[in-house]
Image (cartoon, rainbow, N blue to C red):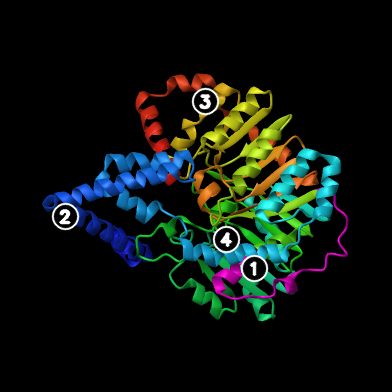
Amino acid sequence: MNLIKKFFSHRVAFIFVPMILQLAFLISIIKRFNEYFVFFYGASVLLSLVVVLWIINNRDKPAYKIAWIIPILLFPIFGGLFYLIFGGDKLGKNLKKKMKLVVDKTKEVLEPRDDILEEIGLQDQCALNQSRYIQNNGYYPPQCNTETQYLPLGEVKFAKLLEELSKAKRYIFLEYFIIEEGLMWNSILEILVEKAAQGVDVRLIYDDAGCLFTLPYGYNKKLEKMGIKCCIFNPLVPLLSPRLNNRNHRKIAVIDGCVGFTGGINLADEYINKIEKYGHWKDTAIMLKGEAVWNMTVMFLTMWCYLRGTDEDITKFKADYSSNKISPGYVQPFADSPLDDEPVSETVYLNLINKAKSYVYITTPYLVIDNEMERALSSAAKAGVDVRIITPHIPDKWYVHEVTKSFYKNLVESGVKIYEYIPGFIHAKTFVVDDVYGVVGTINLDYRSLFTHFECGVWMYKTSSVKEIKEDFLTTLDVCKEILWEDFKNIKWYQTLTSSLLRIFSPLM
């Protein structure tokens, strides 16, 4: 009884209960009309047929199409209408037009760095092609003179973040998917309030769905009273809408334009193992100091201007990088969004896999990939590239983990080595390739991260941190269990059936 009272007093109830009632009402109306009007039944079936034809001919991924076509054909009376509500144009024309300002502003402020591209090209044509793709299609250019430090645990990132926040003199920009009150957030908040009182420009963006269970309603107003400017990304409303699918999954911290952080680590205590949810939580981040932080500053401010409805002069936030010490390698922070038809994150990953010569080492909490990604991993392994992937042993979502495991057999058969992190849950999203390339960011190997969420990452070429990522990967293998061919002999038929069914609908999870 107490749990029921607690649920209905939480804002989750005010969001989802009305949506469930709307859905039930919609179904009941359709059933009632169907009982009395044969024409309505025919119209519903015709609508579903038209929707299926539309899905077949649109530009969505084949896996996403199948995930919708099957239920529509099974339930033609409801299917077509449900697709129009939940699966149509993800952002809508008006919202896309508004969010195009983010892209336009990014292009306006971030100048192409063809001089750096030329430097990269003199060293490696393959690296040039990868970097040029990100600049031309993601609009974030490569930068140099940037110190990179790989942070192998949430606890390490937390300590570094507190240290850098305490040094802030001009501004602090934070953008996170999940924030939860506890040791980590409260420690950060204490510094933010102190800095705001000193006149530092402190701004925060958080995703409403990500914080649905962790922050109370109106928390943004509470922060504003503390002197912290705050925006909520895509606020949840109790209405059936496809906009619920598009979330801001980025994790960004920028201090004075000189220091930047990103990676998988949100601002909640499980990320620093202060509390235990799924065993030991293994996560990673990257800290940048230097010119490449400008990319991250623009990334944050363009989103801020969109959410706030302002047109700020972003250039005034650019730091003076003239005194930076020369650091080896090239660093290219980039963002990805569902507002265009360019799969930047997936292409970055595919380029790394397809161009690898010696090895590809990957960590990901979810291995829910499409046919193109599966084929790339398998082809690389068959060609003799050492492809290794670490996934969790203790999942945070059992159904997603079942889908993850459904990919094991074909990948292992192709020569891909898969390991599960025995101590608990690995939430890191990293790629390291051939001792020269590395990516650390927020991008999971699943449909939502690659195609429906706002994400970010840092592509690196010949930085000192690339070897640090590799060393951490190899060290982590010591506490992992490799998935061997013999392991598939013990799988029950009903487990295979369950995984197969879940896999069909994995793009909708």
Report which residue position mark 3 lands on.
410
Task: Where is residue 416? Give x, y as percent.
Answer: 60, 27
Q: Which residue is mark 2?
A: 33
| Residue that mark 4 sits on | 176
Mark 1 neighbour density, 10 Å: few (under 14) some (14–19) many (20 or more): many
Say the numbered circle drawn on residue 486. none
User: Which badge, 2 or 3, is on the more N-terminal residue?
Assistant: 2
Mark 2 or 3: in front is 2
Dot 2 or dot 4, earlier in sequence: 2
Q: Tell me which residue sits at (75%, 34%) in the image.
A: 434
- Specify which label sits upstream in the sequence, 1 or 2: 2
Judged from the image, the secondary structure of the residue bearing numbered disc 4 is strand
Residue type at the position of mark 4 = Tyr
Please tell me whether mark 2 or mark 4 is closer to you in this view. 2
Q: Marks 4/1: CA distance? A: 14 Å
Q: Earlier in the sequence, mark 4 or mark 1?
A: 4
Labels 4 & 1 near each other (Cβ < 8 A):
no
Left or right of 242: which side holds 154?
A: right
- Which amino acid is tagged 2? Phe
Write down the region rendered in magenta.
300-329
Residue 201 found in image quarter: bottom right
Q: Tell me the crowding category of disc 4: few under 14, some 14 to 19, or many 20 or more residues within 10 angstroms, Cα based.
A: many
In the picture provided, is 13 more to the left or to the right than 191? left
